[in-house]
């Protein structure tokens, strides 16, 4: 199908983009990488009369670690995460995630900010950000606010707590402490497809090998990205041994809310959550000990 007609303008700064949003209100949409928005326009699931392209705002494209926090600009491309030496060395769970987003052609243009702001439960980054305890920065007419990622996604698919006049500008992730590790794994029908199911796992151990922090989140097995809170609690204060991992995997599967569709039955998807959680926690443990 062909999108409906619209006016198009490029913004050269965040303030200009926000001013354009104020001017055009509900009739405007923000264009970043466009891999989510353009298909929606083509199928006329949305018909904005005004498109604001923010791709020329260079200040939103960066990856840097300062003061114990990783800062990622919202216009950072998936390919930039994939090839960043900092991400590969310090944040391998992010590398896991970026490299399985769609295909290389998409990753060269798709943005991490757009991935999160679209709030598709099948997108890969939301689960990883939930596991990492990330925050997002939103800027609007009232200024800047920092939103913990667990409060960013609402109870409805494709919705966030962003105000219509706000733009997501940055993602903030706590830098890894000693004895920390994580992994993201997903099952897909073919390379580049959306996940049948996905699991992000991140843990921190103390000097005695006991879990002091745990993050577990699930992709595409519910109406929104899901945080497996009972599974996280089951890990705390325990060694990351096989019995503990299996208990957490069982609880993660219970936390999932899959529905049957062309990718599989709900029962199958729940079983895959359990298997992926086992593997992700084992991989996280191996990364803590230098085994990978």
Image (cartoon, rainbow, N blue to C red):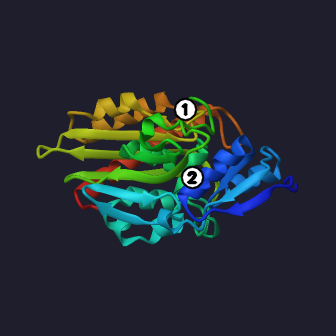
Answer left or right for 198 relative to 232: right
Answer left or right for 181 relative to 120: left
Name the residue located 36 percent from the left edge and 34 percent from the top edge. Answer: 248
Q: Position of residue 60 (x, y in %)?
A: 49, 62
* Element carrying mark 2: helix
Which residue corresponds to mark 1? 154
Q: Position of residue 162 (x, y in %)?
A: 55, 40
Q: Residues within 10 Å of mark 1 (few under 14, many from 20)?
A: some
Name the residue located 74 percent from the left edge and 56 percent from the top edge. Answer: 38
Name the quarter where the N terminus is drawn. bottom right
* Element carrying mark 1: loop
Answer left or right for 224 relative to 62: right
Badge count: 2
Which residue corresponds to mark 2? 115
Is residue 275 visible from the viewing direction of this image? yes
Vertical relation: 260 (above or below) 174: above
């Amino acid at each position: 199908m062909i999108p409906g007609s619209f006016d198009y303008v490029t913004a050269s700064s965040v303030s200009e983009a926000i001013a354009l949003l104020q001017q055009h209100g509900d009739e405007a949409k923000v264009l970043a990488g466009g891999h989510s928005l353009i298909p929606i326009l083509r199928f006329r699931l949305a018909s904005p009369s005004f498109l604001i392209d923010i791709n020329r705002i260079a200040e939103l494209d960066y990856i840097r670690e300062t003061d114990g926090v990783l800062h990622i600009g919202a216009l950072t491309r998936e390919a930039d995460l994939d090839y960043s030496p900092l991400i590969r060395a310090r944040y391998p769970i992010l590398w896991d995630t970026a490299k399985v987003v769609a295909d290389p052609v998409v990753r060269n243009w798709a943005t991490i900010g757009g991935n999160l702001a679209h709030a598709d439960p099948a997108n890969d980054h939301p689960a990883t950000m939930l596991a990492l305890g990330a925050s997002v920065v939103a800027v609007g007419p009232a200024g800047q606010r920092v939103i913990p990622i667990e409060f960013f996604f609402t109870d409805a698919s494709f919705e966030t707590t962003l105000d219509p006049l706000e733009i997501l500008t940055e993602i903030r992730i706590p830098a890894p402490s000693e004895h920390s590790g994580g992994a993201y794994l997903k099952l897909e029908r073919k390379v580049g497809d959306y996940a049948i199911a996905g699991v992000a796992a991140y843990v921190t151990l103390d000097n005695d090998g006991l879990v002091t922090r745990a993050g577990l989140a699930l992709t595409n097995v519910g109406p929104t990205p899901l945080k497996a809170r009972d599974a996280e609690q089951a890990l705390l204060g325990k060694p990351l041994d096989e019995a503990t991992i299996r208990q957490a995997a069982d609880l993660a599967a219970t936390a999932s809310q899959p529905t049957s569709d062309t990718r599989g039955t709900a029962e199958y998807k729940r079983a895959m959550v359990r298997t992926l959680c086992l593997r992700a926690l084992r991989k996280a443990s191996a990364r803590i000990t230098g085994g990978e």
